[in-house]
Amino acid sequence: MTTPRPTHQIFKKIDRFLSIGECMVEMAPAELAGDFHMGFAGDTFNTAWYLRTLRPDIATRYFSRVGTDAVSQSMLDMMSSAGVDTCFIKQDPKRSVGLYLISLKNGERSFSYWRDQSAARTLANDAALLANAVQDANLIYFSGITLAILDAQGRKTLLNALETARAKGKTIAFDSNLRPRLWDSISEMTATVMQAAAVSDIILPSYDDEADFFGDANIDATGTRYLNAGAKTIVIKNGAGAIHYIHDGSSHHIEPPSISNIIDTTSAGDSFNAGFFAALDQVTTMEDKILFASKIAGQVIGRKGALVPLDLTKFAI
């Protein structure tokens, strides 16, 4: 293994972050059996929320659609109170927001969804608004779930906007976040994910999912596939196993800190991504960026729910 090279100058200063996707009503198990706590969460929003917590100096915006009903307004109010800018979230009077319910067993979560009439499914319908939003950011993030909820034209509009933004020097980050139940077929899912990879600079997949649906023989094969698609930086999460990254012509494996108190793995990957983004222009080596992100995720999975308070006294970028 070669000596890791400093990467501080490779990542440009980040001061405007845009996350694209769907935020939903979250019904999470409460302390009393049979009771649930209502909140708001969704993969790309979770990342925006944690990034805003870690880096309040970064202007963090969320791009989506919601309804005009009371629960949609409550969602917008929550985002604003968290410091996430909602100026690019349109309201649709004919739709509302989706809902999901979490079931937990031994720290592992399963989900039930009600999202067919979610306004976020039409988030890419206004191409001009989308173009303005990505133009006003220097780090843009989306996921496989973002793509899965859109129709074919919406996916094309989004990927075209991101491709144009990347050509203009914007940094595009993507988490494949594979959810086969949201797609018409596995082949459609995998083909679309690779189209997304082709317009992305940073890719943050999870190895278990990649091996299941792409048939990757090992974690290195996952990295090579995304490198061949055109990504510059690939960080492959691997549960409690070694994280694999490819960056700047080198490839390495890093053992994350061990976690003994796992309560709820909801948002583990989302908070990891936020930690990685928070460290991009602040931490010198890739190893330290990844270790910082791992520590953030480790704290999150020690509590219940997608969005949990962080003890920032334990972390320093």
Image (cartoon, grey):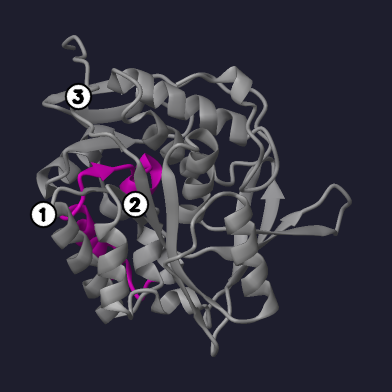
| Element under disc 1 | helix
| Element under disc 2 | strand
Q: Position of residue 115 (x, y in %)?
A: 55, 75
Asked if the residues shown at circle 1 and circle 2 are in contact, with their CB atoms under 8 angstroms apart, the answer is no
Looking at the image, the residue that sits furthest to the bottom is 94
Ranked by sequence position, the earlier of labels 1 and 2 is 2
Principal SS element in the magenta part?
helix
Which residue: 60% across, 49% down?
82
* Residue 237 appears anywhere in the view: no
> Which residues make up the magenta segment?
183-212
The residue tagged 1 is 167
Mark 1 surroundings: few (<14), some (14-19) or many (≥20) residues within 10 A: few
Quadrant of res 190: bottom left
Residue 141: which numbered mark, if any? 2
Indicate the quadrant containing the N terminus: top left, top right, bottom left or bottom right: top left
Which residue: 26% across, 49% down?
215
